[in-house]
Image (cartoon, grey):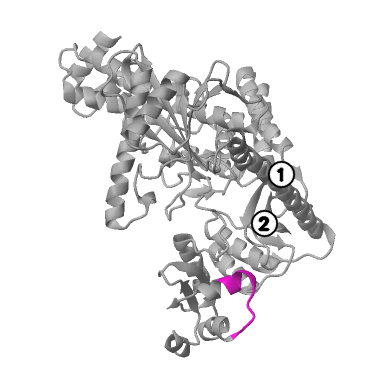
Amino acid sequence: MEIKLQNLPDKPGVYIMKDSAGKVIYVGKAVSLKNRVRQYFRSTGHIGKVGAMVSNVADFEYILTDNEVEAFILECNLIKKYKPKYNILLKDDKHYPFIQVTTGEDYPRILLTRRIKKDNHRYFGPYTSARAVRETIEVIKKIFPVRTCNRNIREGQSPERPCLNYYIGQCWGPCLGNVKKDDYQQMIKDVCRFLEGKQEAILDDLRTKMEDAAESLQFEKAAAFRDKIHAVEKILESQKIISTSMEDQDVFALYQDNNHTAVQIFFIRGGKLISAEQHILEETSVMEQSEIIGSYIKQFYADSAFIPREILIQQDIDDREAIEKWLSEIRSSRVYIRVPRRGEKYKLVQMAERNAMEALLTHDRKARRELDRTQGAVMELQEALSLDQPPLRIEAFDISNTQGNLSVASMVVFENGKPAKKEYRRFRIKTVEGPNDFASMAEVVERRFKRGVEERKKLDQDGKDYSAGKFSRFPDLVIIDGGKGQLGAAVMSMEKLGINKIPVFGLAKKNEELYSTEGEEPIILPKSSKALQLLQRIRDEAHRFAITYHRSLRDKNNLHSVLKDIPGIGPKRMKELLKAFGSVDGIRKASLEELAGVNGMNRKAAEELMRYIK
């Protein structure tokens, strides 16, 4: 590594730090790789995150770029790719939702998407949640008759049969071929103005149209415009005018406490606060505010569909001019990053900071409650059941069937008081006929631990950890849904395999009684007990998982029973119909065209199926 340090070029680029296992632990950019990277290894006294990172660096690589802006872009892309431990990670694998207006089509649509592509479409966002996107799209559909179908409609094509939206006045029906492309595109321009926050202009247009319709005695049409005006006004009521400059601005502020940082963003469009976003960053107590906000801004705008002319921040950041240049290139016009010290803009930053503080306090309160609800409940459960160690991993089993038919079992896992859904397992009961929950429980518990014992032997031979197997990790506690009968059956199966050190309890639902193998009398936990509430959540989750599996099998079985007697429907077609519609109800609701379009089907078979099923 010393030779690499000596040969570092005095040029801009990105450096990639790796640990002894070759894993990327930090990505940074530099105007001069030679000066920046050497600082880490020539300087002493690094503290906090930097000190921890440097102590773990075993090797590094670098990539040259032509300028600092290219280095910014590459740095952001590599951070998203590798998610290094010592970088500030903005989105935690979360892809924020955007609104996509498919302006590359003759007759555009409005869609929710989480991926921005370099195409001819327009994107608006990011939004804080998919729910916010759907609500916005619903409002737009009330105001503008935008098509929602996925047909490939082009100007001048042959007419097609319109869908229900056309008949109820929510779509112009371009599929009929009677809507000019230019007229439709003009409407889409209004949609884009709406999404840009220019609702007042839309409102003025609607009022003019309503008045014209009323003067022409077209009262139904005027009433429709009135309803659209009310929808826009409702949106405007939720938007607070907080800037007299009437500009597009984003406001960033943060608040630090202990080991967390809350970042608050205000999105101001045309002087109105149209939305806000909060994000909690972990392990940032030793980091400077300027470093946090700088890293946040770079990662945030690397994925943003819109960059405002002005960005307000509470504290100056390194490379501000370079970031401005980078954002200006993306926006194709000048972008300013400002640190206001007085006036209206300073008050906006202060308001964002107050919201960041409240967000962090709320986050801390929720975290304490969740810790008490999960890990606190685990510790309470250890004491209540007199366990030798905290039950950090709990497995629960449940049986589900209909009068003994299609009997299934579930195994759910809770770790540290929280569901570990990747560890869930489900079973078809193989050896038991009829409604015998005791024998079914014995079978599933034996199969689960037998698989575990076999996997452990194999992993021991291969020198691998038990976490590498599907069943090789054993629980600290087993919960059986049921009373003494189910409990005895489960314990017998475990003892048969030589597993007798794992505590096992049965939870009877009627009176929420816990049964153990050591005493006749049940254990009654107080209803307010967090330990009991945890057990109830685990038991209910095991029941939900089992019954969901049972219902899916029952639906498939019912479908097969119904379809097997229909002429022309063999096993292959039956399988494809099941894949396409999932149930008999799904097939009943399907149109003739949809049935005929299923792989392997034709119109004649679809007509026969429809005649029989309906």
Where is mark 2, residue-wise? 260
**In the image, residue 67 lies in the stretch drawn in magenta:** no
432 sits left or right of 520 in the view: left
Quote the CA–CA distance across marks 2 and 1: 13 Å
564 sits left or right of 412 in the view: left
User: How many numbered discs sit on the rendered protein?
Assistant: 2
Quadrant housing residue 474: top left
Question: In front: 6, or 452?
Answer: 452
Locate residue 129, reporting x and y percent: 57, 42
Q: Amino acid at mark 1?
A: Arg
Residue at point 56%, 20% (across, down):
521
Quadrant housing residue 453: top left
Question: In front: 113, or 102?
Answer: 113
Where is mark 1, residue-wise? 365
Q: Amino acid at mark 2?
A: His
In which quadrant will I find the N terminus?
A: bottom left
Locate residue 231, reporting x and y percent: 65, 30
Locate residue 524, reporting x and y percent: 61, 23
Q: Are marks 2 and 1 in contact (CB under 8 Å)?
A: no
Query: Relative to 189, is 302 above or below?
Result: below
353 sits left or right of 517 in the view: right
Residue 583 visible within the image: no
Residue 53 visible within the image: yes
Give the magenta range: 43-52
Query: Relative to 578, is 47 above or below?
Result: below
Label 2 or label 1, whichever comes before in sequence order: 2
117 sits left or right of 344 in the view: left
Residue at point 58%, 65% (across, down):
327
